[in-house]
Each structure stands twice: as structure tokens, then as C-alpha cells.
Amino acid sequence: MSKIAEKFVLAIALAAMAGGSALAVEANCVRLSFKPVAGTYLDGTTDASAEWYAVCGSKDAVFAGITADCKAVDPVDDKIYGCLKANNLGRITCTFDQDGRSHFFVFLLDTRGATGAASAAYPTVVNGVKEVVDVESSAVASLAFADATANAFGFSAIPSDLTTEARIAGIDASSDPENIIITVEGVHKALQYNVRTDSDAGKVAEGGLADTPKTSETGTVQFTVPKTGDRAQFFRLVRQPLDNK
């Protein structure tokens, strides 16, 4: 078990014994406990209760964001203390060092892959984020519930080590009698991609999605587009839309 995981396991045990639902600051130690009301993903239909939550801190009132590989966009001012799922009581409970931060945030993540399920392991791919908690350390705030249903998901930030731009490198309409094979190069392993298709070049930006969302450790991935119908004429590579998994 990693040191981060050990810290959060210990924190959950301590908070469970202490009980209560509050953000408490004691010296440099912060204890956060609340029951999130997460609602659904941006698609409006899928329950997000099994998702991960990122517990974060900042030196000021603004948290710059979370990258698609689950890192702080601004690691100088901001810090991700760790990611948790709600426990069997539906609560998020943890204790962590304040570490010079004065504001604390919790973000609901969208870690769904091609199957539509949240990541089973500690997330390394974050498609979208939604703020659940924003509170100053000086305010001991009651957080019996934190309702994020009114907040919208936004795309996670592009990872800092993304040095190539994903592009459609090949369109093969002859190898397979039933499908067009689209080869994409330059993908980042922490980003989900898809291809939109349409019969009208002017409408392809809003066209239908061709395949399941995909990513790649090698930087190259292929999408399959059926030849049936009249959509398979124009193609556009996109990040997997948060509202259409």
C-alpha cells in the first residue's frame, strides 16, 4: 500500500471514531467529513455515486484545476492530497496536513472509460471534474451534505507532458468490406478520444460518435466506422464528450 493510501486509510479510521460532519482545522491538521450529493454525470442519466473525489488545497481562493492524468495544474500553489471514493455510509472522510494551504476543495471526477464505468483503481485518467466543496480553513463549516447537482462538469486540463497533437493519420476504406478504419497518432495516454462523423462537412463538428472512447499507451489508436448509412463521409477527431459516454 502506498504512503498516500496508508494516510487516507488511517484518516478514515480516525474520523469514523470521532464522528460528526465538519471541516475541522487543528494546528496543521485538517479533518474533512461530509456526505456528497453528486447526482449524475454531465450526460444527465448515469449515477456518479461510485466515482472518485479529489481532495485538494490551495494557497489562495482559486484552485487552478486538475489535469487528465490527475495532477494539479499549478503544483506550486495547489496540491491534490489524494483521491477517495465514498465509504459504505456514502461519506467522504479524511484527515491531512494543511501544508501551507488556506483553502480546501473537493472535486467529483469523471474517470469513466470505454465501458462507462468509473475507474476501479486509483485514477490516472480524469475526463472531467466538478467542484463539490470550496471552503476556507478559517471557517469551521458544517458539511453534513455537499450538494454538487447544480454544478457542471468541465473537461480536465491537458497534461503538461503532452508534446504531440493528436491527428487522423490514415483513413482505410478498402481493407474491411464493412468498416472504415481510422488511424489516429499522437494521442496522450491520459486522454479519451473519439471520432465524429457526418455526411455534411459543415456539420461534422456536431456529428455522431463513431466508436467507443479510446486512448493508447503507445500514442496510436484505431477507430472503426461502419460503412452503412450515409454518415461515414467526413470525420473529426475530438476529446470524448463528457455528456455522451
Image: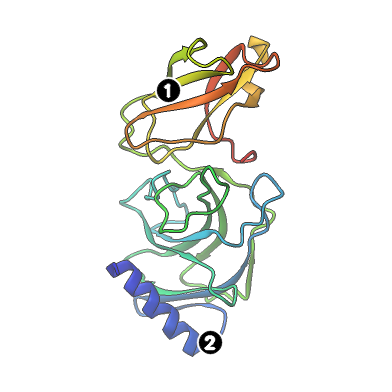
State the image coordinates of residue 220 (x, y, percent, origin top left): 37, 27
Answer with left or right where residue 104 lies relative to residue 202: left
- Residue 164 in percent (x, y) is at 33, 25
Q: Is residue 148 left or right of residue 219?
A: right
Pick whichever, 145 or 244, lies toward us: 244
Q: Amino acid at mark 1?
A: Val
Q: Position of residue 123 (x, y in %)?
A: 42, 54
Kindly identify the amino acid type of the residue bearing the numbered disc 2: Gly
Q: Nearer the viewer, residue 135 or 203?
A: 203
User: Which residue is farthest front?
Assistant: 177
Residue 106 in sight from this viewpoint: no
Disc number for residue 19: 2
The residue at the point 32 percent across, 33 percent down is 218
Quadrant position of the C terminus in the picture: top right
Q: Eyeballing the image, is 132 above or below 86?
A: above
Tell me which residue sits at (32%, 67%) in the image: 4
Q: Is residue 60 visible?
A: yes
**Position of residue 71 measured from the top left corner of the image (x, y, whole percent):** 37, 50
- What's the coloring here? rainbow
Query: Label 1, on which residue?
Result: 184
216 up-or-down from 85: above or below? above
CB-based contact (under 8 Å), mark 1 and mark 2:
no
CA gap, disc 1 and disc 2: 51 Å
Task: Tell me if mark 1 has few (under 14), some (14-19) or many (20+) residues whose alpha carbon lies within 10 angstroms of its own.
Answer: many
Horizontal side, residue 228 vs residue 91: left or right: right
Image quadrant where one finds the N terminus: bottom left
Of the residues tagged 1 and 2, which is closer to the observer? 1
The answer to which image quadrant residue 228 occupies is top right
